[in-house]
Amino acid sequence: MEKTKELPEHSSRERKRRDSFGMFDGYDSCSDDTSSSSSSDESEEEVAPLQSSLPIIKNNGQVYTYPDGKSGMATCEMCGMVGVRDAFYSKTKRFCSVSCSRSYSSNSKKASILARLQGKPPTKRAKVLQKQPLVAKLAAYAQYQATLKNQALNKSAVTVEGFSWGSYITSNNLPAAPVTCFKHAPMGNCWGDIAEGVRVEVPNTDHNHPQKVFWIAGIVKLAGYNALLRYEGFENDSSLDFWCNICGPDVHPVGWCASSGKPLVPPQTIQHKYTNWKAFLVKRLTGAKTLPPDFSQKVSDSMQYPFKPSMRVEVVDKTHLCRTRVAIVDSVIGGRLRLVYEESEDKTDDFWCHMYSPLIHHIGWSRSIGHRFKRTDILKKQESHYDAPPLLFTKVKDVDQGLEWFKEGMKLEAIDPLNLSAICVATIRKVLAEGFLMIGIDGSEAADGSDWFCYHALSPSIFPVGFCEINKIELTPPRGYTKLPFKWFDYLRETGSVAAPVKFFNKDVPNHGFRVGMKLEAVDLMEPRLVCVATVTRIIHRLLRIHFDGWEDEYDQWVDCESPDLYPVGWCQLTGYQLQPPAPQTTKDNQSSVSKQKKKSKSQQYKGHKKMTPLQMKEELLDGDDYSFLQTSDQESNGSGSYFIKQEP
């Protein structure tokens, strides 16, 4: 192990000890207060010498953690987070982190309230917004308000704001998608070998010392960024196990205490178990893995985002899907962009998406490929605004648009951009440059084509004819089509159309690592500023069916395995974004009563899912066709499937 820098206030004996096994300097510095500690001469057994270095994992981290201690709790006066008092920042322990302390002193509370009034993303203290903007959602919100009143009378009730991933996963023994499944998320490309058994140094919440002390813990279970930790020495005793974000600033590699001059003290509950804790740790840690020394720096580096406020981009017009508009980057949170349309004077006309979203492009993109574009009424852009460099945007794969290529009028199957729970019969309406296509959903298109949607030819959201039938997914037929069950062969003959050749579609299926039942955090694309607790319920090659916990299945979404709108468990805590917890049972009951009467109808407002006003829903109740997914067994595959259309006589 590399020798740590010599600290002048320590004796030569302490320096020698730190050179040979630096992590014990912190522990020995508190030996006067720890009755069970003793010198190395009193070792009870022979211990093999420690290896020169512990096997290192490639990872990094930096964000606040809140060990689930039983006493000494405190509440941050800025963000409202509850955690162990000793782990809080400043002498007064009023804030959970340096950022909260600074934010408080800069009067950002008022700014936060103003931001919420302007429709900006909810902060940690913001009330939870329910998922669907329908009658069920309104009823759910009313129920939520009533619940808050009841909870004010009943102190034992737990509010939805008190949702804990750790408790949720532990109580139900749920698996979570590993961080390596999310290449766009912090640490997604350098998570390395972090797994059960890795040792770290974390705050010790079971002690009677006046200062903050640390102890070594091992990872018992991983759930995204979150880890269930158990202090060394507890063996099979889980009484003091606690969850924390492994990328937090209070999680360190073994040896950090020694190099930082921090005290390493065993938990009070088990101090009586050993008289020589040094020998115990040498034995336990020899050959064990820990985090790399630059772990926190790697996390910090992975959370640097190239998009900055005031940058100009082109983004889909949410009122007319067939065109793009200029928007200004207003804020960046965890790589997610709040874009304000350039013509919005009060900055309330906004759109949320990830910086890697296929919905945003550099200025001039629409003209270069022949896409429709809404010219701004603003004659001169503000001096503070500037065009985002083209290199910042996700580059699509080059395609050969030769003689054999997609043609206007060809039929295919596509995820409906206004209802991500449905895969529909669709038609290519226009072929653009660089492999882009304008797609229309059969039977639901506006007369002026304002709801055509731009997909790239290699998009994972379009499929050849027959894809749904092969994979036992219910295909949504054209609205008003009465010849059911729908058969592609008959439909092509009736419409005089041809199916787009299978060879033109993207059939690449990455080894994504997702499994049915895994938990994650996912954007609700009906309200794309919300990130919710979600579950993978089906896997069809690279296509994932995402279910929002506590909500009806009809609000599920089909999402690509590499979608930038999916995140590991703990992403919201890491980035400071507000996580929307599962809907309570009372809300689900309200959903059921409404969903039995209707299915969502389409509007021209793009937010991912179909979005309805109460008036639109009333009309849908009077005139609407019911199409839902077949209840089939879960199918999981990482291999490419066959694509064909059955030729029927």
Image (spheres, rainbow, N blue to C red):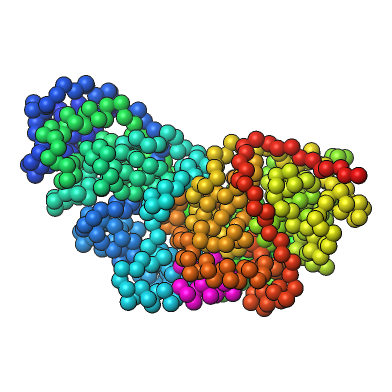
Q: Position of residue 72 (x, y in %)?
A: 21, 58
Q: Nearer the viewer, residue 102 or 448?
A: 448
Q: Nearer the viewer, residue 617 or 529?
A: 617
Whether residue 355 appears in this view of the structure is: no
Q: Is residue 517 magenta?
A: no
- Quadrant holding the N terminus: top left
Q: Position of residue 579 (x, y in %)?
A: 46, 59
Relative to 98, does residue 11 appear above or below in the rendering? above
Q: Nearer the viewer, residue 31 or 313?
A: 31
Horizontal side, residue 631 vs residue 447: left or right: left
Horizontal side, residue 492 vs residue 193: left or right: right
Whether residue 30 appears in this view of the structure is: yes
Horizontal side, residue 110 vs residue 416: left or right: left
Residue placed at 22% from the left, 21% from the top? 49
Magenta highlight range: 128-144
Residue placed at 45% from the left, 55% from the top? 572
Residue placed at 18% from the left, 39% from the top? 26
Q: Is residue 138 magenta?
A: yes
- Quadrant holding the C terminus: top right
Q: Position of residue 19 (x, y in %)?
A: 20, 28
